[in-house]
Structures are given as structure tokens and as C-alpha cells.
């Protein structure tokens, strides 16, 4: 027969004390609360490695063209506005124009070795520009004229690498407008005047902070093709292509 009476081992097991962890469980919430209070009320505070907010001038975010040229062959003097051909049809010009101008003296012609009016303006039709073969270029397509000498820049402009595009990144949301050359550059004096740079973006990268002398220790950053090591002369070349590391 089976004996259902408890044995001595069963009595001992029922009298065995609970594991120590069970008795400490009620203290865990209190421990976490105390720890949270110490962190909240303690003297420690996180200082992000950011400079103060920089006031950005309005021109930085203004997407209006730098210049607003007339894309029509007109000339204004006083209160009168004429087509270019209105005067040049009856007033002949000399065959060469590398001389001091008697008209249009407000023009500041500083375009490198391009010092002749007829390099760009059509001889017969002053309401148009001229290409390398003597054909007319419409006045509202000045980028085709610039492409005569600045072919590589024109190629970059076509693909969006040079110049500026206004509008939407996603063409499904709206149109994109490529600004023409003369909406940024003065065609007679193309170089830009010196401009004050806009404030740079703030950064959480420790490399930038260490580079500016704010880091407590020098931080080693792996070199990449897009970020050469700080102080490296790689890719530092003069306009003649010399200099820098091979």
C-alpha cells in the first residue's frame, strides 16, 4: 500500500526559507526612485557640444535671383525704352569695337580677353546674340551664348551641378526652374563681388569640436575620401595643378 503520510524530507522542505531575492523585491522600486531623484536633483547636467543659435540674415534663405536682367533686347534712357535695333538700324557701328565706347558708357566691360562687342552681339540684328557660325541666338537664351566659351560650365549647368535651381526637388510636386547665367552673373563683368559667408551649421560630431579646440582630448577619426585627416595636404593644389600629395 502507498503511504500518504508526509515524510521527514517533506517536512523539512516545507520549512525551508524563501530565496533571498524574494525578500529584496519590495526594495527595488524604492531603489530606482532614489536613483532617479539623485539624477534629477544632483549637480550633474549635460552640456551638448553646440554653439549658440546663430541669427541667419534674410538673404541666406531668399531664393530670388541675384540679378533680374531683362530677357528682352531693350535699352532704357530717361523715361524712354527702345529696342536695341531701333537705334542700331539707323546708326551703323564700326567693324571693330575694341575702342572706348561713345555710347553705353555705363557698361563696365571686364570679361577677360573678351573685349569686343561683336564676340557676343550679332552685327546685323542687335536684338539677338551670335554663335560661332554667325547664326542668331535668341536674346532670352543667353546660356547658349555663354556656352561658346564656357562649355564645361554649361554642361554642369544643364545637369544641375552649376548655378541654382528654384522650385521642388520632387518634380511631381511642382516645377523646377533653372536660373540662367545672367540671373547670377553680370555678362559684362561676370566675377562675383566678395560676399560674407552664411553661418555654418552646428554639429554634434566630436571630430569637429576637437578640431576647434573644444575637445578635452584629440580624437582619432578614420580618413575617408570625403573627409581627409585634419592637417593633411591631400588634394591641396594650386591652380596650375601642382602641389598636394600624389
Image (cartoon, rainbow, N blue to C red):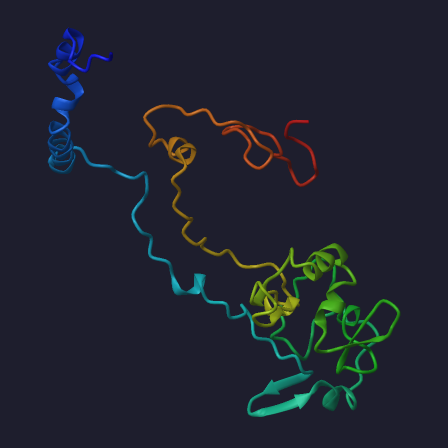
Quarter placement of the N terminus: top left
- Which is more toward the observer, 20 or 73? 20
- Please give the name of the residue rendered at 39% of the width and 33% of the height, measured from the top-left corner: 206
Residue 104 position in % (x across, y down): 65, 78
Image quadrant of residue 10? top left
- Please give the name of the residue rendered at 33% of the width and 53% of the height, measured from the top-left corner: 54
Apparent side of residue 240 relative to residue 214 in the rendered image (left or right): right
Residue 113 position in % (x across, y down): 74, 58
Quarter placement of the C terminus: top right
Image quadrant of residue 158? bottom right
Residue 86 position in % (x across, y down): 73, 91
Q: In the rendered image of this protein, does residue 72 appear above or below residue 86?
A: above
Apparent side of residue 102 relative to residue 202 in the rendered image (left or right): right
Q: Residue furthest top?
A: 8
Q: How many marks?
A: 0
Answer yes or no: is residue 203 visible: yes
- Which is more toward the observer, 13 or 229? 13
Q: In the rendered image of this protein, does residue 138 appear above or below residue 13?
A: below
- Which is more toward the observer, 242 or 246? 246
- Please give the name of the residue rendered at 32% of the width and 38% of the height, measured from the top-left corner: 49
Residue 34 position in % (x across, y down): 11, 32
Q: Residue furthest front?
A: 1
Apparent side of residue 51 relative to residue 194 in the rendered image (left or right): left
Answer yes or no: is residue 43 visible: no
Q: In the rendered image of this protein, does residue 109 appear above or below residue 23?
A: below
- Please give the name of the residue rendered at 48% of the width and 56% of the height, measured from the top-left corner: 195
Apparent side of residue 217 relative to residue 43 in the rendered image (left or right): right
- Which is more toward the observer, 213 or 19? 19
Image quadrant of residue 165? bottom right
Amino acid at each position: 500500500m502507498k503511504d500518504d503520510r508526509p515524510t521527514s524530507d517533506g517536512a523539512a522542505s516545507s520549512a525551508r526559507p524563501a530565496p533571498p531575492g524574494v525578500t529584496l523585491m519590495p526594495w527595488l522600486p524604492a531603489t530606482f526612485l532614489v536613483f532617479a531623484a539623485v539624477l534629477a536633483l544632483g549637480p550633474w547636467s549635460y552640456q551638448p557640444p553646440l554653439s549658440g543659435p546663430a541669427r541667419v540674415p534674410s538673404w541666406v534663405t531668399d531664393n530670388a535671383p541675384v540679378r533680374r536682367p531683362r530677357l528682352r533686347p531693350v535699352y532704357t534712357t530717361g523715361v524712354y525704352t527702345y529696342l536695341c535695333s531701333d537705334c542700331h538700324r539707323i546708326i551703323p557701328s564700326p567693324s571693330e569695337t575694341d575702342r572706348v565706347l561713345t555710347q553705353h558708357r555705363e557698361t563696365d566691360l571686364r570679361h577677360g580677353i573678351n573685349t569686343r562687342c561683336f564676340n557676343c552681339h550679332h552685327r546685323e540684328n542687335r536684338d539677338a546674340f551670335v554663335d560661332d557660325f554667325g547664326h542668331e541666338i535668341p536674346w532670352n537664351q543667353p546660356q547658349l551664348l555663354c556656352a561658346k566659351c564656357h562649355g564645361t560650365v554649361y554642361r554642369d549647368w544643364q545637369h544641375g551641378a552649376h548655378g541654382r535651381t528654384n522650385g521642388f526637388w520632387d518634380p511631381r510636386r511642382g516645377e523646377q526652374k533653372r536660373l540662367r547665367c545672367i540671373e547670377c552673373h553680370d555678362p559684362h563683368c561676370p566675377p562675383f563681388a566678395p560676399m560674407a559667408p552664411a553661418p555654418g551649421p552646428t554639429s554634434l560630431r566630436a571630430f569637429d569640436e576637437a578640431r576647434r579646440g573644444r575637445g578635452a582630448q584629440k580624437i582619432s577619426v578614420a580618413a575617408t575620401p570625403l573627409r581627409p585627416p585634419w592637417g593633411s595636404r591631400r588634394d591641396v593644389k594650386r591652380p596650375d595643378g601642382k602641389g598636394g600629395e600624389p
